[in-house]
Amino acid sequence: MRPTVVFMTDFGSGGGAVLAGVVRSIDPELGVYDFDHNIEPYNIRQAAYQLSTVVPYWPAGTVFVSVVDPGVGTSRKSCVARLAHGSYVVTPDNGTLTMMLGEIDEVREIDEDANRLPGSEDVHIFHGRDVYSYTAGRLAAGMIDFEGVGPAYPVEKVVRLALTNIVPHLGTGWAEGGIYNFDVPYGSARINIRNREFQQVAGFAYGDLFHVAVMDGDRLIYEGEGRYGRTFGDVEDREAFLVGDIQPGERQMLRFNTCDNFIKAHAPEIERDQSLTVDWRVRFERP
């Protein structure tokens, strides 16, 4: 069975048609799937998170193409990362791989002389079509192996985003961490505290109340009380809440929100720039 090529871009609805066409022109038997073409334009942070939530659920050998590329045509690298479970990610090396770094076995820079759609040599602003889709199609079809992508370079050199500068700390009855991502439509903040450690180290159980303070240095962003639940329905309509996020096991972090939408009510500036929160500190403790 041929591998599937899975696309994610910020091109908008219908933006994947030409990318799929390039792949199918290489091998009509290849499967193609449009995961998400509605990433916010140029939002590499959002692309990094979305990629990390989807890749683990596809079979080994899947080739993911992520094109959120504000630096297209510049000196930033184009790469293919081979993951520990056998899949590949074709992407600009611009931070998109940040949340997958622990899963990468090897990364190679795409040799654009060997892996570029014929006839596109004078086009410098559409690598998603001319380089990434073409390379992904050839890799999925077996026309090149991983070594045929181009030269390897150290995984440590992969560009990573500064998601949060706050290192999580936990003790009996309290936990402190940083915000590494947001679910913008719903207003919730993803906290870099593992759900299991919140229970096992800090000692919180589902149903417990907590006091929370969100600080940017000395500036208070939000302070209040809420409830820790298994799911959204475990809390009252007017309560702030804390639940485990969507990833299972050791990868499950915490998700925090307020009844009035944390982002819109208390931090509207991050709708424009989520990087503003790299130094925001979130502390939970028993009331």
Image (tube, helix red, strand yellow):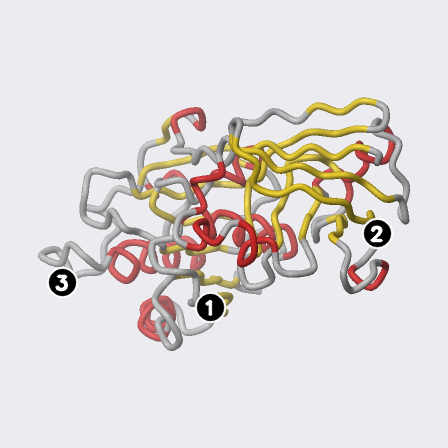
> Which of pointers 1 and 3 lies earlier in the amino acid sequence?
1
User: Amino acid type of disc 3?
Assistant: Gly
Q: Nearer the viewer, mark 2 or mark 3?
A: 2
- Tell me what residue is drawn at x 44 percent, y 62 percent: 7
Q: Quadrant of the C terminus?
A: top right
Residue 148 seen anywhere in this rendered image of the structure: no
- Would you name the residue on which mark 2 appears? 229
> For the residue labelled by badge 2, is the local secondary structure a helix, a strand or a loop?
loop
- Tell me what residue is drawn at x 69 percent, y 48 percent: 255
Please identify the residue farthest to the left as the structure is shown. 122
In the picture, residue 263 is in which quadrant? bottom right
User: Amino acid type of disc 1?
Assistant: Leu
Q: Are marks 1 and 3 in contact (CB under 8 Å)?
A: no
Few, some or many C-alpha atoms within 10 Å of disc 2 (few <14, some 14-19, many ≥20)? Answer: some
- Would you name the residue on which mark 3 appears? 119
The vertical placement of 177 against 141, above or below, is: above
> Which of pointers 2 and 3 lies earlier in the amino acid sequence?
3
Q: Identify which residue, 287 or 37, lies in the foreground.
A: 287
Q: Nearer the viewer, mark 1 or mark 2?
A: 2
The vertical placement of 23 against 275, above or below, is: below
> For the residue labelled by badge 1, is the local secondary structure a helix, a strand or a loop?
loop
Give me the disc on residue 137.
none
- Would you name the residue on which mark 1 appears? 30
- Tell me what residue is drawn at x 51 percent, y 66 percent: 35
Few, some or many C-alpha atoms within 10 Å of disc 1 (few <14, some 14-19, many ≥20)? Answer: some
Distance between the alpha carbons at the discs numbered 2 and 3: 56 Å
The vertical placement of 97 against 65, above or below, is: above
Distance between the alpha carbons at the discs numbered 1 and 2: 43 Å
Q: Is residue 188 left or right of residue 236?
A: left
User: Amino acid type of disc 2?
Assistant: Gly
Residue 193 seen anywhere in this rendered image of the structure: yes
> Which of pointers 1 and 2 lies earlier in the amino acid sequence?
1
